[in-house]
Image (spheres, grey):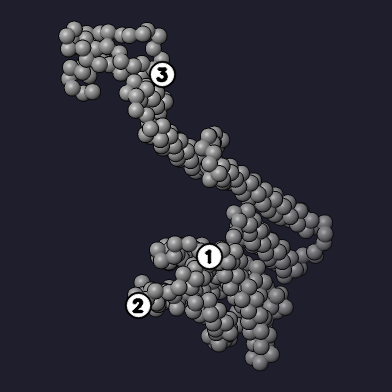
Amino acid sequence: MSARALYRGFIWLFIKGSIPAVLGTITLCFLGLEFTPGQWLKLMLQIPPFVALFIVPELWLIRRYYVPLGQVWDQLDRGLAPTQAAISQALVRALNLPYYAFLRVTLVRGLLGALVAVTSLLLTNWLWHGGFAAWQIVMFPALVLLFACPIYGAIEYFIAARHMVPVVEYLWQHCPEMTRVDQRRLIAIKLKSKLLYLCLFITALPLLFIAIIVLFKVDQMLRVQGVPISFRLMWPLWGWIGGALTVTITGAVAMAVLTAQEVSRSAARLIAGMNEVERGNLDVDLKVLDTDEYADLTRGFNLMTDGLRDEVRILEVAQDLAGELKLDVLIGRIMSAATELLDAERSTLFVYDAERRQLWSRFGVGLQAAEIRIAATAGIAGAVFSKGLG
């Protein structure tokens, strides 16, 4: 992938996030804000210039963030050798890009989009007698700021994170290690923060927005029908919607916190085990405490430590045997080490006696008898010897 293709990928991310956001906002306005055909016509004529007001700043931010990464990518693409510091900085840019994309959509697009929505409606009322009511002027920017942008900010975060995977993998091929300064520049987004954001801004705020619109619509319909509005009449509806909101939001936040705590606890156990291994303690044995993906990770960690312990034992045995010259002592150490490495209860070394056609025990680990003699064809040892498998 060339540097130009990389930049086109950045722009494509922006387009994939912008088109659904604009279409989704227009659809929600069409369904809930009761614009007349004349009002829609006046708004549609303003969409191109007003959309440009918040698209141009976003494109400028994308370009500004891309340039350092693109310079390194272009050098690699032309076969040049950028400095390790430059590649390290490019890695930080690529890894932090999903978070900055999320901020760009949530803050820049959200705030500018809400401002553009208010300005458009007010100008239409002032210049062309648009007839937009006060509640429409309030609901339109609220829809953009509280409903559309948080959702598309989260979507763009995950799309950007997936898009950056091959970019990061390619940069790592040319950067053996990230500098400590750049490591501190990485923005860590904890799982708890992600889940709480999803609960509050993807669940709670949209539900609250919908509840307010429902209450307003009911109140409006009753007034149109001439029904007198009173607290006694509206209280059951208010109470039901408020209770449903409270239960739903509380449950979502509680589940997010509990899930994050469970994942963090499992991750902390693995990290603590890896720290022990790094300090040279290979006796770490983590117990499987759950049935999710961390169960497989825990089993894999234990298999890794088992393999490391076996390697250490082999190295220790090789070091012990390197200076031993006595054959009987050497055989004894080899047999003891093999027994331990194989987790066997006992082991025996049989030697063939050609005169008696017998196998006799030259050395045994865990044997009570001083010597064992069996026929050369008897038992498992005889079968192995006679068939030449030993």
Left or right of residue 150: residue 77:
left
Q: Amino acid at mark 2?
A: Arg
Above/below status of 353 relative to 263: above
Which residue lies at the image location 39% right of the left edge and 74% below the top edge?
81
Give the labeled residue for mark 3.
Answer: 345
Instruction: Mark 3 or mark 1: name the one nearer the start of the chain.
Output: 1
Q: Are marks 3 and 2 in contact (CB under 8 Å)?
A: no
Q: Which-is-in-front pick, marks 2 and 1? A: 1
Tell me the amino acid under the disc marked 3. Glu
Please state the horizontal and vertical placement of residue 71, each as a whole percent of the image: 45, 78
Q: Of all residues shown, which one is farthest toward the bottom?
A: 127
Q: Secondary structure at mark 3?
A: loop
Q: Residue at x 17, y 20 (%)?
A: 387
Mark 1 is on which residue type?
Thr
Q: Is residue 350 above or below residue 326?
A: above
Frontmost residue, 341 versus 102: 341
Asked whether 163 or 156 is in front, the reply is 163
Q: CA distance from mark 2 to mark 1?
A: 24 Å
| Horizontal and vertical percent position of residue 159 | 48, 64
Q: Quadrant of the C terminus?
A: top left
Q: Picture coordinates of residue 224 (x, y %)?
A: 72, 70
Q: Which residue is mark 2?
A: 78
Task: Report the Cα–Cα distance between label 3 and label 2.
Answer: 63 Å
Q: Quadrant of residue 366?
A: top left
